Amino acid sequence: PKTAENLLRKNLVPWCIVPFDASKRNPEERAKMLVRLGLKRSAYDWRSQHVPEFEEEILQYKKHGIEFFAFWGGHEKAFELFQKHGIHPQIWKTLRSPKSGTHEEKIRSAKEAMIPLAKRTAQIGCKLGLYNHGGWGGEPENLVAVCKALRADGYGNVGIVYNWHHGHGRINEWKDDLALMKPFLHCLNLNGMNTGAKPKILALGKGEHEERMLKILIESGYEGPIGILDHQNHLDAEESLRINLEGLQSLNQKK
């Protein structure tokens, strides 16, 4: 069977490959690793020690034909560099989980907290992805409500980045959740899925539920970007990504 375009290796987005790489690669080594794996894009997560490498990461991706696809959170130095180098990665930011108030008040509060970043990313021509990371702000219904509220305020660059590894509580609702989020999805990050997040991070093809969840995804006709995870502190990122790529290939062959 033909593989969907967004599941082809060259279109996949590797995620959590910087702080979580046991080999602690530098930007050049990371770019070369992606080339070896046949990957053409990268979503960049970072910690404070990586700030001095921001520009080198951009330059190495350009040199090796890698698309700088997404950037975690916000950082003014990075935003200036994106403009300098003429790139427009998606910006991924966790949606807040307000602790009190009515449902409507929580939506307004979460929306207002995101407005400065929505404005800044719009100025530099970048999409902003509301990222699920557990809690109230990780529920698909709330992600969609806040996304709609921001768009109604004129921030058409805002969408959703949904992570299976932060959605274990919604495995059974995946079909409905996907239908709800699909018009707003900027990226969907896959993971092996066991009931109760045991373990939370699992390679594709090793869990109980991802075969069914992937089938639902393909049948939905979703054509947007799809990410795969490293996120394993104890593993070399290349090894971790390779295991996921092989797992995804085997899942694709089963469908």
Image: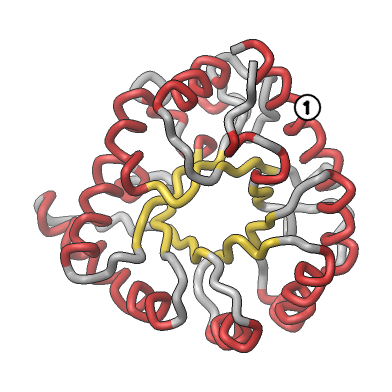
Query: What residue appears at the point 63 percent right and 26 percent down from the top-left corner?
Result: 3
The residue shown at (49%, 48%) is 187
Residue at the location (65% across, 41% down)? 228
Residue 178, quarter of the rendered image: top left
Image x and y of residue 221, in percent: 42, 29
The correct choice, above or below, for 188 with respect to 108 in the image is above
- Looking at the image, the residue that sits furthest to the top is 254
Residue 80 is drawn in which quadrant? bottom right
The kind of residue on which mark 1 rests is Glu
Residue 85 figure quarter: bottom right
76 in relation to 203, above or below: below
Position of 50 with respect to 22 (left or right) is left
Relative to 24, 186 lies left or right = left
Residue 45 visible in the snapshot: no
Q: Nearer the viewer, residue 49 or 151?
A: 151
Quickly name the residue at label 1. Answer: 246
User: Front-most of 82 and 19?
Assistant: 82
Q: Is residue 159 above or below residue 224?
A: below
Quadrant containing the N terminus in the rendered view? top right
Name the residue rendered at 36%, 55% in the picture. 159
